[in-house]
Image (spheres, helix red, strand yellow):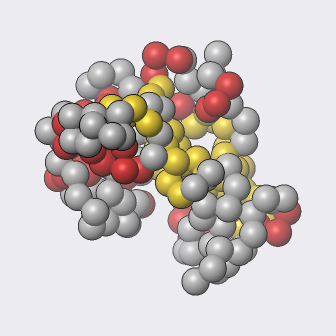
Amino acid sequence: MTPERFAGTWYHSVKDESLVDKILAGGGWQPDLVNNTIYGAAIYLARTNWYCDQAARRIIACELSLAENETMDVFDASQIDANLGNGRSSKHLRFFFQTMQVPSHKNAEKGMSDSNQARKRFFLERGIKAIMFEEYKDVDVIAVYDPSVIINVRGVLRENVEDCPVRPI
């Protein structure tokens, strides 16, 4: 059973609606569809206003099917910054990558880049299929490293998603 904090409906938005059509037509999510990422070749999902892009008329809604041991949502940053300790922020995640000697940087790259593939392998080799972190204050994001855990995929109109305001440019 999917852990409660990973359960429920999650959303993904892209400007290019042909990608929405490709994903919904059964092509599924592929790392090469990810253009700008710093956390590995993953599919990024949000619950509310993280990425409801104003140019996207349709967004993808889905759920996840995960076991507790396939998830991670706390990252130890204490070896880099003793004041941080364990936590859920994107800063904790970046420092965790440093501690574990996984390539990490602040510049976004294509999903299929060597460093993004290394981050993906790091989690999958440990049986972790999805991680959750706080991208911005009070905005949780899930990075899914194994697309097979994404279920009930459907397209929805952005304006029909209650908590999906247009993010500022």
Which quadrant of the view contains residue 125? top left
Q: Nearer the viewer, residue 113 or 87?
A: 87
Residue 165 shows in this picture: yes
Residue 95 percent location from the top left of the image: 27, 44
Q: Residue at x 30, y 22 (%)?
A: 126
Residue 70 percent location from the top left of the image: 45, 22
Tell me if 52 is positioned left or right of 115 in this view: right
Residue 53 versus residue 132 in the image, above or below: below
Tell me if 92 is positioned left or right of 66 in this view: left
Residue 137 percent location from the top left of the image: 57, 55
Which quadrant of the view contains residue 56? bottom right
Residue 91 percent location from the top left of the image: 37, 50
The residue furthest front is 83
Q: Residue at x 84, y 59 (%)?
A: 162
Tell me if 143 is positioned left or right of 100 in this view: right
Q: Residue at x 67, y 78 (%)?
A: 54
Residue 120 versus residue 60 in the image, above or below: above
Q: Residue at x 36, y 60 (%)?
A: 37
Q: How many numbered marks appear?
A: 0
Residue 145 versus residue 36 in the image, above or below: above
Residue 60 versus residue 83 in the image, above or below: below
Q: Quadrant of the C terminus?
A: bottom right
Residue 96 shows in this picture: no
The residue furthest bottom is 169
Q: Quadrant of the N terminus?
A: top right
